[in-house]
Image: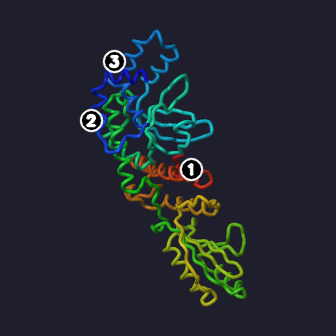
Amino acid sequence: MRMLELADRELGALADDPDYAPDRSDAPDPDEVRVRAQCLVFHAASPTVSEIFVASRRADLSRRERRWIRAQEASWLSVWEVSDVTETGVMLEDLLTAERRQSQPTGAIRDVVARDAILARVVDAEGIAIVAGLHPVRLPPPLTDAVLEAVREIVGTSGKVSPERLRQIEAHYVLLTTWNAVVKRAVEINGMNVGPSLSNADGDAALVTTDHFEVDPRDRATVGARLSALTTVRAAPDGTDHVLVFVRPDPPGAPIIVARGLLDARRLRVESNSVERADARRREIEDACGVLVRHRIRAHTDPWRVVDEHPVSPAELERKRELYLEMLDKAHDGLGGKTPREASATKDLRPAVERLLRSIESFEARLGPGRGVDVKVLRRELGLD
């Protein structure tokens, strides 16, 4: 508080400058106010408030207190992305300077997940990286990229930004106002609900679709035999005769699974990952079995909706994993019409593939332990691990 009082006296005009702290109809969050105050104390003007404070109070400050103040002065405000979270630490990467730090998973960042981005000051003190000032809103990758693009355009660079540049008061203004603008716009559009928009290899929108057919117990064996005789049906991986795996035979040698069926004594249940695939399987089944099967009901499930009170089954996670793998060989507008697999092999498009993977990782990490897919398999498939 002593330094804040000094800041008010030394930098009162700047602290009240509407260009730095623009008038807003809603009161800023206390955490945001704290970030602004720290930037003013440790980085605004020359000498800084902290330098004036140390010079005037040197006899009253311990050596450790002086080291802490110097560490604060050496820090900078930037966009830090969580690259990994473990029991022992949170790995952070500065997306503007490319600096990396490991911080403790405590305090303000105790609940971050992979690919979250935070606007923060990270202070190196006594061998420990400490998040000492943090904007209250974290961003997922698509919104983070919007901030980075705007900031780089304003500072006039497409590459790295030096820590020295980010210590300047103008950089603080750009970062804070841009971050707030992106947050406000995202809330207005979709309430910050940013997740991957996926389709299968046929280009169909992903929607888990389950068709239920009624089967007379006396006809079960015949129905099973007729379906197993189809050229698009393969033996189940576990060898059970009541599980049916429908495939699309192309490309040769690597058939794509398009549906799974389960035949018991009285019903046949067939699940696909799009309405179009479900329609095709229904026609195929009814053509093969005729009156031996009777369609009763169709159900749809959003593949990305997580119902907190129910556990996610391994089969549900596997369905999502298959969708992600199919995505690698589907043309993507954001990749110039190329597939992620094709784009990852080119230098110019590889950053766009990386952004796509970060978005998926962020979405899955937010679902919580045991509920999200480990998408490291996608990086391995593309050689980006």
Element on which disc 3 rests: loop
Q: Residue 329 location, x and y as percent?
A: 48, 60
Cα separation, mark 2 vs mark 1, equals: 46 Å
Assess disc 1: are there few (<14), some (14-19) or many (≥20) residues with their C-alpha within 10 Å of its C-alpha.
Answer: few
In the rendered structure, which amino acid carries the disc numbered 3? Pro
Element on which disc 2 rests: loop
Q: Nearer the viewer, mark 3 or mark 2?
A: 2
Q: Residue 1 location, x and y as percent?
A: 43, 24
Question: Which residue is painted at 31% across and 42% down in the image?
Answer: 24
Q: Nearer the viewer, mark 1 or mark 3?
A: 3
Q: Residue 196 location, x and y as percent?
A: 47, 57
Element on which disc 1 rests: helix
In the rendered structure, which amino acid carries the disc numbered 1? Lys
In the rendered structure, which amino acid carries the disc numbered 2? Pro
Whichever of callouts 3 and 2 sits on the residue coming sooner in the sequence is 2
Q: Which residue is mark 1?
A: 376
Q: Residue 247 location, x and y as percent?
A: 58, 71
Hey, which residue is sitting farthest bottom in the picture? Answer: 291
Is 214 above or below relative to 24?
below
The residue lying toward the viewer, choosing from 377 and 346, is: 377
Cα separation, mark 1 vs mark 3, equals: 48 Å
- Mark identifier at residue 90: none
Q: Are marks 1 and 3 in contact (CB under 8 Å)?
A: no
Whether residue 318 is visible here, answered yes or no, is yes
Q: Which residue is mark 2?
A: 18
Hey, which residue is sitting farthest top in the picture? Answer: 59
Assess disc 2: are there few (<14), some (14-19) or many (≥20) residues with their C-alpha within 10 Å of its C-alpha.
Answer: few
- Quadrant where the C terminus sits is top right
Q: Which residue is mark 3?
A: 47
